[in-house]
Image: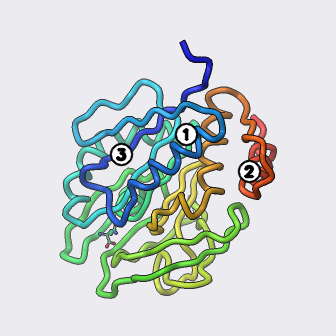
Amino acid sequence: MSDVNELVIVSLYPRDMNIYGDRGNVLSLSRRARAHGFAPRVVEVNPGDPLPAQIDIVLGGGGQDSGQGRVAVDLVARGNTMRDLASDGVPMLMVCGLYQLFGHRFLTHTGEELTGIGVLDVETRGGEERMIGNIVLSSDEFGEIIGYENHSGDTTVGPGSKPLGKVLQGAGNNPRDGVEGARTNNVIGTYLHGSLLPKNPAISDFLIAEAARRRYGSFEPAAGDDLTVQRARESAKRRPR
Ligand code: GLN
């Protein structure tokens, strides 16, 4: 039996929701978890698959409207479980298509309504305009966040979530509000592909720190003077249980 602490990473709907390299988030997070001394175990969950008994982190990616249609009913069936996990502090990162479905609803540009699970207080409408290009955010918690957006969904954030960051370059949730993404508890929704995590290790460290503290009671970042480790340390200090 290994004395290395495992972290179970659920990769949600990798078959249908994995666009613009979102799978890179799973690879990058696993690698970063290993660097911090954990043994990551990735469990892929496609529609109809059981969820593992232990869940430490949940990752989800983006997809076409058609892919979202394929997973939406399955996700709604898991809605209570996901809301409970989110309330219990499980860290999650949902990109683009799954960001939209972790909100209340997505009204597609063809008039279809996809019901979401309301973990995030956001609502999305498919618009005429596509928001495409590199995007830069500033975030109090994570510093500068860099990624790539490509969506026609126009998202608004309600009072139950706060935006992930302010848009310095690009569109973000919509062309009007100057903000991007949403956050409730330890759940982050964002339009940023890229993949996101290889470019933004502070977010990986946040996911790992919160998961480790929830499951094992503490998080000691791997020794090193890298800035992201310092940020993870500060984040771990800021939210004692
Ligand atoms: N279909 C959604 C939109 O265009 C999501 C796109 C994506 O996941 N890249 O808004």
Q: Return the x and y of residue 174 as percentages of the image width and height.
A: 46, 80
Inspect the image, locate mark 1, and give the three-letter code of the amino acid beneath it: Val
Q: Residues within 10 Å of mark 3 (few under 14, many from 20)?
A: many
Residue at point 42% right, 24% down? Answer: 53
Q: Are marks 2 and 1 in contact (CB under 8 Å)?
A: no
**Along the line of sight, the residue nearer the viewer: 172 or 24:** 24
Q: Earlier in the sequence, mark 3 or mark 1?
A: 3
Inspect the image, locate mark 2, and give the three-letter code of the amino acid beneath it: Val
Q: Which residue is mark 1?
A: 90
Residue at point 56% right, 17% down? Answer: 2
Using residue 127 as the reference point, say whether residue 154 is left or right of it.
right
Q: Return the x and y of residue 191 as percentages of the image width and height.
A: 45, 68
**Image height check: is 96 above or below 46?**
below
Q: Which residue is mark 3?
A: 12
Q: Earlier in the sequence, mark 2 or mark 1?
A: 1
Instruction: List the single residue furthest toward the top.
Output: 1
Quadrant of ligand 1 in image: bottom left
Q: Residues within 10 Å of mark 2 (few under 14, many from 20)?
A: many
Judged by depth in the image, the label closer to the viewer, 3 or 2, is 2
**Along the line of sight, the residue nearer the viewer: 126 or 168:** 168
Ligand 1 within 8 A of label 3's CB? no
Figure coloring: rainbow
Ligand 1 within 8 A of label 1's CB? no
Please tell me whether mark 2 sits on a helix, a strand or a loop.
helix
Judged by depth in the image, the label closer to the viewer, 3 or 1, is 3
Inspect the image, locate mark 3, and give the three-letter code of the amino acid beneath it: Leu
